[in-house]
Amino acid sequence: MHKNLEAVNESTVAGIGRLASFFGFSDVMGRLYGTLLLSPDPMSLDDLAEELQISKGSVSMNMRSLERWGMAKEVWMRGDRKKYYTAESDLWLVIRNVLGSREQREVQRALIVLQESMVKLRAAEAELTDEERELACFYLERIEELQAFFEVAQLALQTVLGQDNELDFEAVTKIEIV
């Protein structure tokens, strides 16, 4: 392979690994996804382990995660009993899968915790001293602000997740950032 192709492959795979770490996934998971994404042909667990210089066990474990997140899928190769994989190349679909399961669940959990906190504060109001009541009012104000933020975040997630798989790229290119 030409040195420039090799360099681009290595830097892209490493970059996807760093990006995966930034979003709370493992670096290995990101590098596996990047390797599959840049491979024109399906790759076996052995191929992936050799390419990334990691154990086959690590490859296998991380591939299961990639499959769960909808980032990779197993493909059948005629005449071969090994497992082969390809990357999901529709990045909008990948983002929707991740947002739909992880972030949406976390936003919902945050809203529940905030609601429970508000109920506890209001239930204790009669038992509080004047100073504590003042602090409880301050807490309620802040919690209501947080709740409003998470409700907007939930709406944004639902908007993104409710969109069709296709994005109107012509419309996106017309957006001006001032």
Image: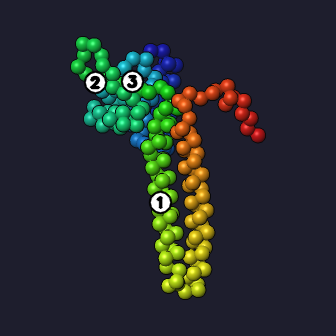
State yes or no: discs 1 and 3 in contact (Cβ < 8 Å).
Answer: no
Callout 2: SS: loop
- How many other residues sit within 10 Å of disc 1, few (<14), some (14-19) or many (≥20)? few
Does residue 176 appear to the left or right of 58 in the view shown? right
Which mark, by number, is residue 83? 2
Residue at left 60%, top 67%?
A: 142
- Out of 144 and 50, give the one closest to the viewer: 144
Res 112 label: 1
Q: Position of residue 47 (x, y in %)?
A: 32, 23
Residue at 64% in and 26% down: 169
Q: CA distance from mark 1 to mark 2?
A: 42 Å
Q: Amino acid at mark 1?
A: Ile
Tag 3 secondary structure: strand
Quadrant hosting residue 76: top left
Q: Quadrant of the C terminus?
A: top right
For the question of whether residue 35 can be seen, the reply is no
User: Which residue is denoted by mark 3 in the rendering?
Assistant: 86
The alpha-carbon separation of the residues under discs 1 and 3 comes to: 38 Å
